[in-house]
Amino acid sequence: MSALIPLPQPISPATGGPKPPIPPAPPQRSTDRGAGRTRRIAVHSAVGGAGRSQTVDVVRAVCVLIVVMLHALMVGVERSADEGLSTRVALAGTEWFAPASWLIQVMPLFFIVGGFASAQHWRRVRSRTGTSAEFIQSRVRRLALPAAAMIAAVGAALALADGLGVDAALLAEARLRMAQPLWFLAVYMGVTAMVPIMIRLHEVRPVAILLGLGSGIVVVDAVRLTVELPAVGYVNLVFVWLFMQQLGFLLSDGRVEEWSSGRARSGPGAGGKGAWRIRTGGVPRGVLLSVLALGLLVVAVTKGPFSADMLVNLNPPTTALALLGVAQFFALSAVKPSMDRWCAMRARSVARAGSAVSAASMTLYLWHMPVILALAAGMWAVDLPLPAPHSGAWWLTRIPWLVALALALGGAYAVRAALTRVRQSAVASVTSGRGSSWRTSIWRSVFGRAATWRWALGRSTAVCESSPRKRPAHGFTGAGQAASCVLAAVVGVLIVLFRLGDVVPATLLALALLTLSVWPVWPSR
């Protein structure tokens, strides 16, 4: 900067005149060819810190793909003695699965990166003077719309199969398997609705909030084990997942990321015999803390009351699962700066693919189980071999099975993207009046202009980002409406999750509640 901006020259006390200028040091050539490039990327990352993180998108995409692959491998389908179709949970009870579950249990990590993304989104909304009610409704809409489409399609398919005389026990099993993943949707809606409040608490007392939630996890487990009442453990659905979301808030601040990626190797400094400083070349602090959390987890499952199977610790969530999440958090915070540079410099195609999968993560998560069961039913219908789970033939067919699933999900994603483009094009033409005059006239004359906006549910998702409102940044205007949206969506999902009633009435009631949750209720201004 001194070479560009002339600095005032100091006055010599002896002569009163200016001292002769000190010649600048000759420029030194950097020995690191990528130093300038890295600095530019670091500056770009810092400037764009409020936007989407490519690393977070890649991590979220990997989490979704791991969940899909795991569920695909856990569906055991074989022919019964009467040439029917029977299903069971594969991989459960195998000796190697418990240690492997420490690697493939990614739900804590998913909530952490979800908290990171939610924090960034809420801060953008707040900077545009949007309200928390608008933020909540937009987030609920993003979750409820794909859920409503899946529930409608699955309900119609089950009703059709029942009408065609498919075995009732098989239909009940299929209904159970397709509803099980919805637990995540209900919990995710709940914790996402708490984002404005929890971020406000995080900004005031971040450590105290984490300690409070962590203490709640331990207390719930202690009560559950003391009174031997397993149902008490489900209180940790609140404490554990809010704890993971708060870790995501902490990661989005950037300070923990910078500290965790620093090296923990120390040595004598230049300040004397007792001076110590951090030197480069050691292990990142986040990695050390991740190993420490894993060590505590080992103690908890070997000396404590918790299972070594992390899928068992998922239902209900336990202290062991929270420790795994802490280990994942520190590991991610340690490697995130390097992953940011990697995505920006050498893996742009990977980053783009990760962003695409991340954007469709909820659709992939909701649809993967119906697609898996549909593939299994199709193989049974055309008399393809269905080897017994864990047999040699079963393992040999897992790669073709996963490839077929990937192709089916890719086709479903392409159809969804095409329908989204058609809907957006139709909305743009109808609402702007640039479309066909007879179509626009019929639509507006039959349904009215207000119905046009109600039909264009997807457009209002961006209200809180593109339409600044003169409201307090922390206001809770419309909080009652937002709470009603969340409650309607969660109850609709729970009806399907717990299979309350017959298929048709339960599906219709769930769809009605989900429709209410996404219906635009904000008054025009």
Image (cartoon, rainbow, N blue to C red):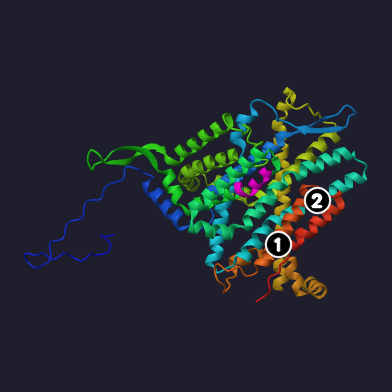
Picture quadrant where residue 386 is located:
top right
**Amino acid type, callout 1:** Cys
Label 1, secondary structure: give it: helix
**Is residue 2 found inside the magenta-colored segment of the image?**
no
Q: Position of residue 377 (x, y in %)?
A: 82, 37
In this rendering, is residue 447 above or below 168?
below
Please tell me which residue lies in front, 202 or 286. 202
**Which residue is labeled 2 in the image?**
153
Query: Is any part of residue 87 visible from this angle?
Result: yes
Magenta: main secondary structure equals helix
**Amino acid type, callout 2:** Ala
**Which residue is labeled 1 in the image?**
485
Please tell me which residue lies in front, 218 or 344. 218
Q: Who comes first in sequence, dot 2 or dot 1?
A: 2
**Dot 2, how many residues are within 10 Å of its Cα: few (below 14), some (14-19), or many (20+)?**
some
Q: Nearer the viewer, mark 2 or mark 1?
A: 1
**Is residue 237 found inside the magenta-colored segment of the image?**
yes
Q: Which mark is residue 48?
A: none
Task: Name the residue: 88% across, 48% down.
Answer: 159
Picture quadrant where residue 307 is located:
top right
Label 2, secondary structure: give it: helix
Q: Is residue 24 left or right of residue 345?
A: left
Q: Position of residue 260 (x, y in %)?
A: 44, 44
The span picked out in magenta is 232-240
